[in-house]
Image (cartoon, coloured by chain):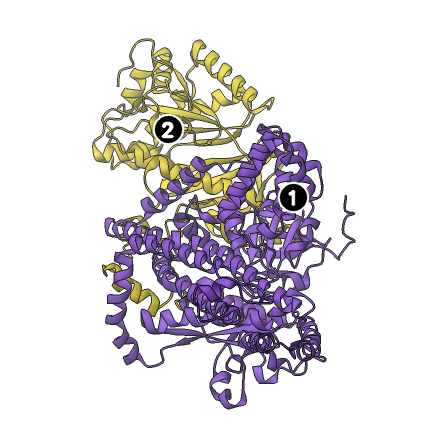
Amino acid sequence: MTAPPRAALLAWFDDSAGADRACLGGKSASLGEMARAGLPVPPGFALTAHAFLAARDASGTAGAIAAALDGLDPGDQAGLSRRAAAVRELIASWPVPPDLAAAVAAAYRELCARSGHGRVAVAVRSSATCEDSPDASFAGEHDSYLWVRGADDVLAAVRRCWASLFTDRAVAYRAQLGYPQDGTQMCVAVQQMVRPRSAGVAFTLNPGNGDRSAVAIDSAWGFGEGVVSGEVTPDNFLVDKVLGVITQRTVSAKRHAWLLADDDQVRRVELDAGLAAAPSLTDVEIVAVARLARAAERHYGCPQDVEWAVDGDREDSGQGGGPHVVLLQSRPETVWSKKKVTVSTGLDPMASIVATLSSPLHARKP
Amino acid sequence: MADRFPSPFDITTPPGAEGWERLYRYSSQFSADRREYEDSQFWFRDGVHWPEVVTPWDATIYEYALASLSQYNTRHYLIPPALGVDFRILNGYTYLSPVGVANPAEVEARVPHFLERAGYYFGNWDRLYDEWLVKIRALVQEMTEIPVEPLPEREPLEVITGGAGFGSGFTLQESYHRLCDLSLKLWQYHFEFLNLGYAAYLDFFGFCKQAFPSIPDLAIAKMVAGVEVDLFRPDEELKKLARLALSSGVAAAFDEANPEAVRDVLRGSDAGRAWLAQWDESCEPWFNFSSGSGFYHTDRVWIENVDIPFGFIRDYIARLAEGEDLARPIAEIHAERDRIVAEYRELLGSDEDREAFDGKLGLSRTVFPYVENHNFYVEHWAHSVMWRKMRAFGEIFVKAGFFTAADDVFLLQLDEVPVALFDMYHAWSVGVEPRGGAYWGPELTRRKAILAALRGWSAPPALGEPPEVVTEPFTVMLWGITSESVKGWLRAAEGDTDGALSGFAASPGVAEGPARVIFAADQIGEVQHGEILVAPLTAPSWAPIFSKIGATVTDVGGMMSHAAIVCREYGLPAVTGTAFGTAQIKTGQRIRVDGSNGTVTLINHPQPPPARP
């Protein structure tokens, strides 16, 4: 890809005039799409493919990188590993062009201002451009840095993300499939970290029976990792999508939680019995999570499986304005969505009434 | 937890009520000769319609209603699996038991008849309903015109010169028979559409529950419910009159406490007279409106108790003066209903389902105006006239020295009134004193004591062994009785409630506040702003207090009960059908009402109620 002149180096997720998807990479594009659809993703910005190319060109190392990867033998594991490491080292040494450094510093300051934090913690995530490349399914092969604070540390993390375009596996994969090693650029998403008071997942249908009128919510204290991995038995809530009322609730004993310590490390903490047995969401929050999931489903046009969190910092800051539920991720639900569900019996109206009277609903076991 | 309720044969007579059986027809009482059948049935108390002890005459209306309901199931439409709902009176309280068709072959044999008969009604519903509206108005008119006049000292000359050939004594007795016949006919009309209406609604309800297993019942109700229904008309007329009082500058008349004084002030100006003309127009028929269920002669009818509607109008005037907009947001209610329908429809899994949904919703909406509106015409309007006419007979008896009060006539069984009338006629025709005063005086004293003793008895919510599952469709729809609610009663009967009650999640939301326990319409003035209303059930005429309470809890009723409908309308949480709400909650106690989950939590011990202003 060739950068057009004066192309944007940086784009806010919620800026509708932001860079096109091809310049953002999959992760940033997806965050941008959600933000622009009004879904409450934590705020942030993306460094575009142009930023990557500008830094590369300014560094004068493009030739050296190409040379290092030239004539790669996918079968030579040790050689491949050595060469990829050399490329990563080159990239990590790139001086960041002054206009890019200034843009990142200004954007970080604005993020601090938006969030009300002096040195807001951010996640710096790799987001490879993905058109026609295998990197789309490669998200895990590129680096992410969590709880990064300060513009300098953000820039350092950005360079490491850039470098992660050439992890051993990514390089080997491209080589095996015959993709050019310089055909992909590394974009970077910089997004405010959320310290969740509670977090979890939500399905925009009842995973137990495929009921599409329901939003099913699993929730626990702290970070959602325990819910996703299944090591915490979460609270479970069912909300009717249309009326927005809670139709079922099961509060479980959540004996531990993953919480953020003062040193920005996430640790497993045992909870006292009272907190363990208390519902991890208020009724208002339950409905807000369901509404958020429903909005994601509406936006994507199919049932979704979302990760969400209640922002513990905004709650503590007493800003008011209702529950602060943020959307962390939204993926299509795949199990029930593929099934065609039909309940109509095909009986004519009168025959249907006879059937109803003969087998009234309350006789049926749900 | 016990697995059954007491047998009707284990129920004893409360002290002081000995001989209560003679107040009611023999056919409506549990009896040893029918014990095998009666003990095999499950009987539940109909607290929805008859929450209190019924007097002998009022009991007949109960019997007319249940026989009419049953007749349409059993003999008119041949509802395949369901015969009628059998009815009994025990210690003055009403108990019902749905009767199914036991033999599967017989159920099968009823199907073609049902298809033909019910199909005809569904296929011609709008026309037949229009005809019903004409019939019911004609019946009310006919009832209104029934002459009930004291027997004259001498027959008017026209009787002679017209060659009538019969006299006032005959006319008076004929009038009574006519009133009874029209009352039974009224109840025939009442059920002409209702059972079929509920059947169509249940079919839509069942479809929604299958497509969306966790869809709240009230979502289904909201999709079907009408927006501008006759049930809300009396309240709308009150608001209209309040607005007119303000706009025409006569609102100050309502500073007078006494309704007659209000009228006097109004009569003194053109604007006031114009207001009174509008009042008269609103009265017929809309203020033929009962402050109760309409099933008791004691339910106060607005038109005869003008202090009730005037009080509401005074309240509305005050709120309008404070800038409150009392108008129901009709356009928003329509839009919200359309949104709910469109969203569920879109969530269905296939076009076949959407087609079925459209068809069933369409039929439900066709039948629902009857379901929603009949209540005004029958229980409110026609019953108002019926009680009024009966009271006219009562007054004639008072004049003749039979009774001390006109309402004593309701202490007679329906079939005893002609006997008393004949006594009066006998004496009048011969020209001597009737025996009535001496005969009925002590008898009515005895009956009053029995009824007082029965009123102090706590009637169990059910009798006999509950079925595994409650399947009878009308029981579920009309009385809100399900397998779950029966289990809840069994638990609550043992006091096993953990400071919580459960019922129907009738209107969503959560509210907390002090309870106000109300048993009858004449207590609704006690309700203070922000309190949670706890009542056996609510009636349409209570509408004006719903704008000041925080939530509602009722002992009886389901998703389609009045409290449920009105609370959804006002956006108030409601839990209906708790069975023991008024028994376990005390006025002043803080309670938490979760109308989304159907639970009521008692938060602390009773405190003294707040002082009244």
Q: Quadrant of residue A299?
A: top left
Query: Residue B513: x percent and y percent?
Result: 68, 48
User: Which amino acid is tagged 2?
Assistant: Glu
What is the chain identity of the residue bearing mark 2?
A: A
Instruction: Please tell me the colour of chain B.
Output: purple
Q: Residue furthest front?
A: B161
Compared with B192, B241 (above or below) is: above
For the colour yellow, the matching chain is A
Q: Residue at x 63, y 55 (%)?
A: B521
C-alpha distance separating marks 2 and 1: 58 Å
Q: Residue at x 67, y 61 (%)?
A: B499
Q: Which residue is mark 2?
A: A33
Q: Residue at x 53, y 60 (%)?
A: B557
Q: Are marks 2 and 1 on the same chain?
A: no
Quick one: label 2, few (<14), some, or many (20+) residues within 10 Å?
A: some
Query: Residue B532: x percent and y percent?
Result: 65, 50
Q: Which residue is mark 1?
A: B311
